[in-house]
Each structure stands twice: as structure tokens, then as C-alpha cells.
């Protein structure tokens, strides 16, 4: 089962991870705008999300994560990624697109409240804390971040930063 966050009116699968189904198997959509006709009407800034733990093999988030929380609010950053991690199964994947930090749309869109880039993803990987805390300027957020994602792919595609993360449960620490 797959979850499409902030689906809008689209139901397209824009990112396919090698070895995973090319098409949706059983898609659940969530959006806060009723006219988009989502399966679940919910504001993703409100947690917990109305889904069970370990419910989805994939979570897709196209042009939505930059609307959640606010830049500099590390608690909301980890809260939203914790929800994604919570609803994913072990080895489940998050596939996402956000505006590239160099794009005029990163901050040009008045609804964007956060920039997510390659550096942001480092904080979601528990193995990186062991390698970097005390060695680099990386802050230690292990007291608030209990989840664990491994980056399995990323690229800049035009105006977008595209990335895929794999959930590790239990977290590698």
C-alpha cells in the first residue's frame, strides 16, 4: 500500500525506485483541500496523522514537504519526518520532490515555509550522527529524532531536488 501526501488532483507516480512496482498497487491519498477529492481529508501540519504504524511500503511527497513547518523549527522538521517514518514499513521508501534551494521557487512561492536540501537529509540518518557529531559542525538532534532513514538516491532535476530515503526499523544507532 502506498501513501501520496498532499496529492492535489494528481495521482501520477513520478518516482519509481528500482526493484519496486512501476505503478501504484493500492494508493491512499491525503490532502487538506476537499475539492481534490483525497481518500483522507487532513492537514499534514496536524499530528499524529490518521494512519496506522507501519501501514505503507511507500510514501510519496511531491511538492508538499516545503509547506510543512517553518525554516529553523527543528522540532517540526523532525515531527513531520517522524510521521513519515512511523507510517512506513521497515525498508519502506519515501520518494519526494521539493524546489531546489537555488530555484526561485524555493522562497518565491509565498506558501513555502522550509527549504529541504541534501544537507537536511543528513540529519535523518542515524549512522551520520556517529560519524559527524563532534567532528563536523553537525548539530546533535538524537534527543528528538528517533527514526532512521538511509538515502538511496538524490538528484537535481530542473527546478526540483528529488530524493528517496529508505526507512530502517529499528533505527540503526
Image: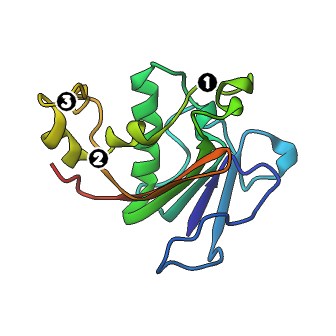
Which label is found at residue 136? 3
Return the x and y of residue 45 as percentages of the image width and height: 58, 31
Residue at image x 46%, y 48%?
A: 84
Residue at image x 63%, y 32%?
A: 67
Counting residues from the start of the chain, the first of labels 1 and 3 encountered is 1
Per the model, the C-alpha gap separating discs 3 and 2 is 15 Å
> Marks 1 and 2: CB-CB under 8 Å?
no
Q: Secondary structure at mark 1?
A: loop
Counting residues from the start of the chain, the first of labels 3 and 2 encountered is 2
Number of marks present in the image shown: 3
Per the model, the C-alpha gap separating discs 1 and 2 is 23 Å
Residue at image x 56%, y 27%?
A: 114
Q: Left of 57 or right of it: where is 145?
A: left
Of the 4 image quadrants, the one containing the N terminus is: bottom right
Return the x and y of residue 63 as percentages of the image width and height: 67, 44
Where on the picture, by quarter, is residue 13?
bottom right
Counting residues from the start of the chain, the first of labels 1 and 2 encountered is 1
Which label is found at residue 113? 1
Q: Secondary structure at mark 2?
A: loop
- Placement of 71 over or under 93, stated as above or below: above
Say which of 55 and 96 sits in front: 96
Per the model, the C-alpha gap separating discs 1 and 3 is 27 Å
Say which of 68 and 56 sits in front: 68
Q: Look at mark 2 in the image and give the residue it sits on.
A: 125
Where on the picture, by quarter, is residue 109?
top right
At label 2, counting other C-alpha atoms closer than 10 Å, the crowd grade (few under 14, some 14-19, many 20 or more) is many
At label 1, counting other C-alpha atoms closer than 10 Å, the crowd grade (few under 14, some 14-19, many 20 or more) is some
Return the x and y of residue 50 as percentages of the image width and height: 56, 46
At label 3, counting other C-alpha atoms closer than 10 Å, the crowd grade (few under 14, some 14-19, many 20 or more) is few
Amino acid at each position: 500500500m502506498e501513501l501520496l501526501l498532499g496529492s492535489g488532483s494528481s495521482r501520477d507516480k513520478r518516482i519509481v525506485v528500482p526493484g519496486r512496482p512501476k505503478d501504484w498497487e493500492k494508493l491512499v491519498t491525503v490532502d487538506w483541500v476537499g475539492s481534490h477529492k483525497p481518500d483522507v481529508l487532513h492537514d499534514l501540519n496536524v499530528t499524529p496523522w490518521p494512519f496506522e504504524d507501519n501501514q505503507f511500503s511507500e510514501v510519496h511527497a511531491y511538492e508538499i514537504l516545503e509547506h510543512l513547518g517553518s525554516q529553523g523549527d527543528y522540532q517540526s522538521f523532525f515531527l513531520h519526518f517522524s510521521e513519515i517514518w512511523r507510517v512506513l514499513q521497515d525498508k519502506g521508501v519515501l520518494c519526494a520532490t521539493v524546489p531546489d534551494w537555488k530555484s526561485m521557487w524555493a522562497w518565491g512561492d509565498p506558501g513555502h515555509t522550509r527549504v529541504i536540501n541534501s544537507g537536511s537529509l543528513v540529519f535523518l540518518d542515524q549512522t551520520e550522527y556517529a560519524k559527524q557529531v563532534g567532528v563536523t559542525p553537525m548539530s546533535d538532534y538524537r534527543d528528538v529524532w528517533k527514526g532512521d532513514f538511509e538515502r538511496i538516491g538524490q538528484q537535481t532535476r530542473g527546478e526540483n531536488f528529488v530524493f528517496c530515503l529508505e526507512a530502517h526499523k529499528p533505527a540503526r544507532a
